[in-house]
Image (spheres, rainbow, N blue to C red):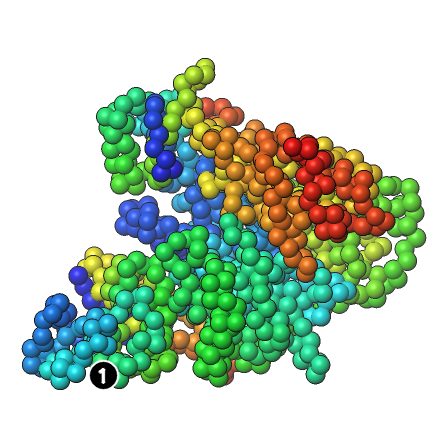
């Protein structure tokens, strides 16, 4: 993991002091709310329905056990004993006091964490594959590049007041688990014929009310050119992105309006002017950052563990957990293990302080003291020996963290919705709870197989409904909650936009509709055909008929 | 909330310090209980209440002052729209948090 | 109004030229950039020193024709969140090698002081009561992750210089 040096510490501490001063000036009225708002947002502090909400950055979703214990401590001491892990691999606290947020940020700074740029019209936390550095299907660990981008984008003098928020995602694996095509900028780590590492660069993706899948600007950008290229991309956007209408201010609108060819032309023209100015870091710096992400010292072990097979043979829950919640590691004898934060009937992404402490302990015992957060709102122990899986699973299961549903229908992404969020039109969490209760039968879930349901409580799409195999969007219909059903989205390498199936439903109707959609799939699927493939083959009509009848 | 609201209204805001939802009372104070909220039944009454609320905003006691439709049809006074009703109770998915627990929650 | 001096430059004392007005002989004037581009021969001949008043909607390449003739630039922020002003200053310094004073006017706030300095601004016009807050904000950060037009070298480079290694250890 990256470790701060004196420069990083000094910068983050300076930020805490700055924010303490800003909060003081707000409390005394020297700063108006209008002036304070963008400043607090740049420190991740929102005002929601019931209280402030603090969003803490978990850069590229990587945490140490020490950091996780600090998150638990913050939940206990300053909040209501829990936190909510988000689709941006961050954590949100729902009840902090404004006057205490500088103390929270100081505590976080002590363990090399911060809330810098987790909101506001600036470059946000860079997200990546939750299995980075711990998966067999990877070209290279993307996190050193994410850290380079984190540093370059922090307190950027020119790009801190962009037309709108700006999200960059990066993946190093063939299988895209970071939804890079749904980001303002997507980067895919590649190796060229000469064995050199670089990136495919995509731009202009995004969700919200105008969902757009990012387009490729460049097939290969060498590592040494990364930051100057990003700088050129941001400069053209900062200058020409729309500022008259916040719904048209994202880069996706600019790229659509200009055309990706023209945007690329302007970016490359600017890049040619700046690529030789020392924006880019020296090679020694890239090497320094990379050294923090060296693979952990794992002794090669056998993949065959009799104890694991025996338990799987007699315990269907463990067998399912093994199948769904563990994935192939780079090193033989190890897996990455997903800790589901989606207990059936529970709140997707929430974890109590005790659960966070337990995960920290388990990371120390079984996973090199390392933890990851996925954009699907789960936690991951990235480096677990297969032989340790029975012991790990027993401890998780006892704490309500052993749900074997990673990637299955009940592994639902849901935004906080109207239960917390002041922007929401409807609640999201209760829909997820009702669906997971309705499908609370492991054999049935295993039979249905991989199926991603994603729920947003408003068009801002924090719940990624556009990218759901089944997407649910809450809308306000004359003051009542109404839910639209969308089918066929994907956030993976085969990204696609989900399409609305028909008229919306009330909170009970939407769950019935999901069940009917699943029933059509089960009836129509071919051997081994997953839900998304079946939908793409069948088209919407057969689903429409089942859900709405023949009229 | 630019929509024009007609009929009885009440005023809610969030306290500057802790962000808690609060309701403007007839005495010009801020209560955590929607039951204490003053209800404006005319434009004049609403204007009076709003001027008190906005003064509190200028004085840095509250932020996000909003006038919302009031529903007096039930046993207790409540905001009519689900969003503001939620604000007066707490998250529906955590019955252990918010004013739904008790009128004195956190006090 | 107070003038906040970010760089220690000798600030220019100018008069904004009223609409349709002609500058006095040898006067120091600031003129909207569109007017400078359209009809500038007389104006430059008469005035002693000319600055451009640049709105944030101005495309940077429109500055190419006049940048060699002006002595200072005044970038007008319509709102403090309009980040185009920062890119305009960067473009003036980077693309045109502009060495004159760049001033920010409009509702910029003290918390932007370092961003302004680092993007290439020299001075800011702000309300007098905010002068102290601007000056305090300038002292806030000890190092930066980017090299900039205020002369700072990024941490990524200083880490690997002899002095940086001494500091980091």
Q: Nearer the viewer, residue B105 or A201?
A: A201
Residue A465 in percent (x, y) is at 60, 46
Which residue of the protein is positioned furthest toward the left in this rendering? C24
Apparent side of residue C100 relative to residue A442 in the rendered image (left or right): left
Question: From the viewer's perspective, is residue A379 above or below residue C65?
Answer: above
Residue pictured at 49% horizontal, 47% vertical: A54
Q: Nearer the viewer, residue A218 or C38?
A: C38
Residue A205 sits in which quadrant? bottom right
Query: Which residue position holds label 1?
Result: C69
Residue pictured at 57% horizontal, 41% vertical: A473
Residue pictured at 34% horizontal, 79% vertical: C93
- Can residue C48 be seen here? The reply is no
Instruction: Tell me the element at label 1.
Output: loop
Residue A212 in percent (x, y) is at 55, 57
Q: Residues within 10 Å of mark 1 (few under 14, many from 20)?
A: some
Residue C95 sits in which quadrant? bottom left
Q: Quadrant of the N terminus of chain C?
A: bottom left
Residue A379 in percent (x, y) is at 67, 50
**The numbered mark 1 sits on a residue in which chain?**
C
Which residue of the protein is positioned furthest toward the top in this rendering? B75
Q: Nearer the viewer, residue A171 or A245?
A: A245
Apparent side of residue A86 relative to residue A20 in the rendered image (left or right): right
Question: From the viewer's perspective, is residue A155 above or below residue A192?
Answer: above
């Amino acid at each position: 993991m990256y470790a701060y040096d004196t420069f990083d510490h000094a910068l983050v501490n300076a930020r805490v002091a700055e924010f303490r001063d800003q909060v003081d000036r707000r409390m005394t009225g020297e700063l108006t709310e209008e002036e304070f708002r963008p400043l607090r947002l740049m420190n991740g502090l929102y005002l929601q329905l019931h209280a402030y909400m603090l969003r803490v950055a978990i850069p590229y979703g990587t945490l140490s056990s020490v950091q996780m214990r600090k998150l638990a401590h913050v939940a206990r001491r300053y909040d209501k004993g829990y936190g909510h892990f988000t689709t941006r691999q961050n954590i949100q606290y729902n009840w902090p006091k404004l006057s205490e947020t500088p103390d929270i940020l100081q505590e976080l700074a002590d363990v090399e964490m911060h809330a810098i740029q987790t909101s506001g019209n600036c470059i946000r936390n860079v997200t990546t594959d939750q299995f980075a550095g711990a998966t067999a299907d990877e070209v290279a660990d993307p996190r050193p590049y994410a850290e380079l981008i984190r540093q370059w984008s922090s307190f950027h003098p020119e790009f801190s007041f962009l037309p709108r928020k700006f999200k960059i995602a990066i993946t190093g694996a063939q299988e895209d688990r970071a939804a890079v095509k749904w980001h303002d900028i997507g980067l895919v780590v590649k190796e060229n014929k000469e064995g050199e590492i670089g990136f495919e660069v995509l731009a202009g993706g995004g969700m919200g009310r105008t969902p757009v899948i990012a387009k490729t600007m460049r097939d290969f950008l060498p590592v040494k050119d990364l930051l100057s290229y990003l700088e050129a991309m941001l400069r053209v956007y900062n200058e020409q992105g729309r500022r008259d209408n916040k719904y048209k201010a994202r880069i996706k609108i600019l790229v659509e309006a200009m055309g990706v060819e023209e945007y690329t032309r302007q970016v490359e023209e600017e890049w040619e002017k700046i690529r030789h100015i020392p924006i880019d870091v020296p090679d020694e710096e890239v090497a320094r950052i990379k050294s923090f992400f060296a693979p952990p010292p794992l002794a090669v072990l056998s993949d065959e563990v009799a104890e694991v097979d025996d338990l799987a043979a007699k315990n269907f829950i463990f067998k399912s957990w093994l199948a769904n919640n563990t994935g192939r590691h780079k090193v033989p004898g190890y897996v990455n293990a997903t800790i589901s934060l989606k207990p059936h009937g529970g709140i997707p992404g929430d974890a109590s302080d005790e659960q966070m402490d337990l995960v920290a302990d388990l990371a120390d015992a079984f996973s090199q003291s390392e933890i990851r957060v996925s954009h699907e709102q789960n936690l991951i122990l990235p480096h677990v020996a297969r032989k340790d899986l029975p012991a790990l699973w027993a401890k998780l299961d006892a704490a309500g963290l052993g749900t074997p549903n990673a990637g299955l229908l009940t592994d639902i992404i849901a935004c906080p919705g109207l239960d917390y969020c002041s922007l929401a039109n409807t609640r999201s969490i209760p829909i997820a709870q009702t669906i997971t209760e309705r499908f609370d039968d492991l054999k049935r879930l295993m039979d249905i197989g991989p199926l991603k349901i994603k729920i947003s409580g408003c068009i801002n799409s924090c719940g990624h409904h556009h990218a759901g195999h089944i997407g649910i969007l809450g809308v306000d219909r004359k003051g009542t909650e109404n839910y639209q059903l969308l089918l066929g989205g994907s956030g993976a390498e085969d990204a696609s936009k989900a399409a609305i199936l028909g008229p919306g439903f009330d909170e009970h109707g939407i769950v019935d509709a999901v069940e009917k959609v699943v029933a059509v799939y089960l009836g129509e699927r071919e051997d081994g055909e997953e839900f998304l493939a079946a939908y793409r083959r069948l088209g919407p009509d057969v689903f429409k008929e089942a859900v709405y009848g023949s009229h | 909330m630019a929509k024009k609201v007609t009929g009885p209204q009440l005023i809610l805001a969030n306290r500057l310090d802790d962000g808690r939802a609060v309701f403007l009372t007839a005495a010009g104070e801020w209560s955590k209980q929607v039951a204490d909220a003053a209800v404006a039944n005319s434009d004049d009454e609403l204007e009076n209440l709003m001027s008190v609320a906005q003064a509190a905003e200028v004085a840095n006691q509250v932020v996000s002052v909003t006038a919302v439709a009031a529903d007096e049809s039930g046993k207790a006074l409540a905001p009519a729209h689900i969003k503001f009703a939620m604000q007066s109770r707490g998250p529906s998915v955590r019955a252990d948090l918010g004013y739904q627990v008790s009128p004195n929650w956190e006090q | 109004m107070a003038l906040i001096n970010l760089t220690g430059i000798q600030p220019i004392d100018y008069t904004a030229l009223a609409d349709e007005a002609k500058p006095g002989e040898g006067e120091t004037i600031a003129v909207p950039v569109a007017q400078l581009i359209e009809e500038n021969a007389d104006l430059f001949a008469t005035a002693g020193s000319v600055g451009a008043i640049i709105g944030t909607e101005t495309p940077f390449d429109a500055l190419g024709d006049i940048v060699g003739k002006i002595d200072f630039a005044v970038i007008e922020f319509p709102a403090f969140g309009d980040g185009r002003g920062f890119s305009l200053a960067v473009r003036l310094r980077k693309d045109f090698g502009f060495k004159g004073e760049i001033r920010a006017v409009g509702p910029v706030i003290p918390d932007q002081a370092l961003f302004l300095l680092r993007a290439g601004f020299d001075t800011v016009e702000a309300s007098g009561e905010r002068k102290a807050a601007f000056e305090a904000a300038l002292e806030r950060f000890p190092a930066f992750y980017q090299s900039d037009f205020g002369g700072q070298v990024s941490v990524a480079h200083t880490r690997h210089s002899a002095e940086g290694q001494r500091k980091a250890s």
